[in-house]
């Protein structure tokens, strides 16, 4: 299993050479949100696809 440091190093390695500090911060932010979401799902705090569709249907117009 990768450590957080390993994940961050890999993320930075795969960014373009001309990445700015803001680019790196944004990608770290996204990585953190994904990790938190995965932990929530693992802890049983997620919602079903049906519930997600119902919630999104209120925001998305066809």
Image (tube, helix red, strand yellow):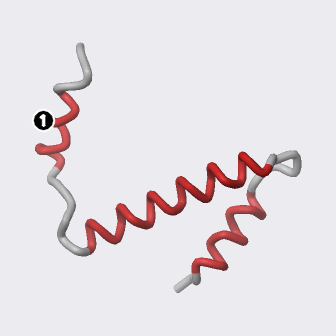
Q: Is residue 51 left or right of residue 41?
A: left
Report the quarter where the C terminus lies: top left
Name above or below for residue 34 compared with residue 62: below
- Residue located at (27% from left, 73% from top): 42
In percent of width and height, residue 21 lies at 78, 51
Q: Nearer the viewer, residue 56 or 25?
A: 25
In percent of width and height, residue 3 lies at 58, 83
Residue at the extreme top: 62
Local crowd at mark 1 within 10 Å, few (<14), some, or many (≥20)? few
Q: Nearer the viewer, residue 1 or 46?
A: 46
- Residue located at (18% from left, 47% from top): 49
- The image quarter containing residue 61 is top left
Q: Nearer the viewer, residue 27 or 21?
A: 21
- The image quarter containing residue 6 is bottom right
- Residue located at (62% from left, 53% from top): 27
Q: Is residue 14 left or right of residue 36?
A: right
Name above or below for residue 20 compared with residue 8: above
- Residue located at (57% from left, 82% from top): 2
In percent of width and height, residue 32 lies at 50, 62
In percent of width and height, residue 24 lies at 71, 54
Name above or below for residue 1 compared with residue 44: below
Q: Which residue is mark 1?
A: 54
Number of marks present in the image shown: 1
Mark 1 element type: helix
């Amino acid at each position: 299993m990768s450590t957080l440091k390993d994940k961050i190093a890999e993320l930075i390695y795969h960014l373009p050479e001309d990445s700015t500090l803001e680019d790196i911060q944004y990608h770290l932010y996204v990585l953190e949100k994904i990790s938190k979401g995965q932990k929530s799902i693992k802890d049983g705090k997620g919602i079903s696809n049906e519930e997600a569709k119902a919630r999104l249907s209120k925001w998305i117009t066809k």
